[in-house]
Image (tube, rainbow, N blue to C red):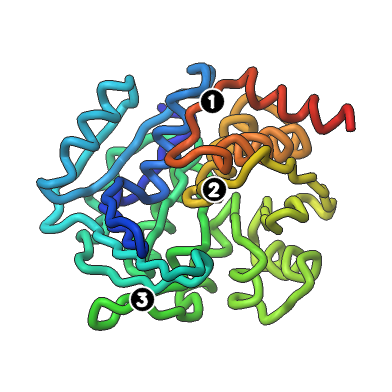
Amino acid sequence: MKDICCIGHITRDKIVTPDLTAYQAGGTSYYMAEGISRLPQNVSFQLVTKVGEGQLPVVDKIKKQGVDTICYPSSHTVYFENRYGIDSNQRTQRVLAKADPFTLDEVRPLEAKVFHLGSLLADDFSPEVVEYLSTKGAVSIDVQGYLREVVDEQVHAISWRDRDRILPVTTYLKLNEHEMEVITSSHNPRTVAMKLAERGVREVIITLGSYGSLIYADGVFHEIPSYAPSRLVDATGCGDTYSTGYLWMRMQGASIDEAGRFAAAMCTLKLEKSGPFDGTVADIHRVIRRAGRK
């Protein structure tokens, strides 16, 4: 049995700016697998993904890094196109191809203490798959994928259709300040956290950008600081990096505050470079200590 099993599609991302067009791998499962491969193997980890033939070299690279990986075939790889204008904050997004959803038969053999579901689109995981996994271990979910669907290649924001079935079987739920408004119609993180806990979520993790993060569990709020990066290079995959650090620490018995600070510092290092986290535990603790001296 693994400590953490991350299930999700690895994507092919096309990045178009006024200056260049670039291609890179992406997706929650990619950022978590890459990030956790940089940490000591105190926590056992398995990646379960599903890609088309063209993305198999990325999977092979992850395997060569020592990550226990199961890769199911898919008719296509999820293919995102992100176009940025002169103002890099303005982005238009299309999905040029979708991978096949994960099925019950594919998840039945899996054994883990925590299943982290890296949903990219609303139909990646059916409620039946999530409910089944919850009978075998704790379920960890990042909300983002449940709030978007594809119509004629265009990405549309939607409400979370199956939340009433999924929230009661979710142990860890991570969302940001924008997503919390979509699923609860509230601007107050504390109100949102309590509402989600009332629906059955055991640990609600709300990331608030430069304001840090708020974690609510067992009726207690934990305020986690953010750590300013020395420079801001690339925010892609930051939320996935937070989940990686948080779960990695929690699986070793760390407190919520310890896990939150570790995850926040891990995100700071990821923000300073393009691509997935590639630092060390020593680097992470250095960020935390540096902030404590200010």
Identify residue type, mark 2: Cys
Residue 37: image location, x then y, percent: 43, 25
Q: Earlier in the sequence, mark 2 or mark 3?
A: 3
For residue 279, the mark is 1
Identify residue type, mark 3: Val
Q: How many marks?
A: 3
Answer with left or right where residue 163 lies relative to residue 252.
Answer: left
Q: Is residue 159 above or below residue 291?
A: below
Answer few, some or many: residues within 10 Å of disc 2's Cα (few below 14, many 20 plus, some between 14 and 19).
many
Q: CA distance from mark 1 to mark 2?
A: 14 Å
For residue 219, the mark is none
Say which residue appears at 73% left-offset and 69% top-offset.
Answer: 192
Answer with left or right where residue 234 lies relative to residue 181.
Answer: left
- Residue under pointer 2: 238
Residue 266: image location, x then y, percent: 61, 35
Q: Earlier in the sequence, mark 1 or mark 2?
A: 2
Residue 5 visible in rendering: yes
Among all residues in the image, which is located at the extreme front? 19
- Residue under pointer 3: 155
Residue 215 visible in rendering: no
- Secondary structure of the residue carrying tag 2 is helix
Answer few, some or many: residues within 10 Å of disc 3's Cα (few below 14, many 20 plus, some between 14 and 19).
some
- Image quarter where the N terminus lies is top left
Q: Quadrant of residue 262?
A: top right
Residue 121: image location, x then y, percent: 36, 66
Q: CA distance from mark 1 to mark 3?
A: 33 Å
Q: CA distance from mark 2 to mark 3?
A: 20 Å
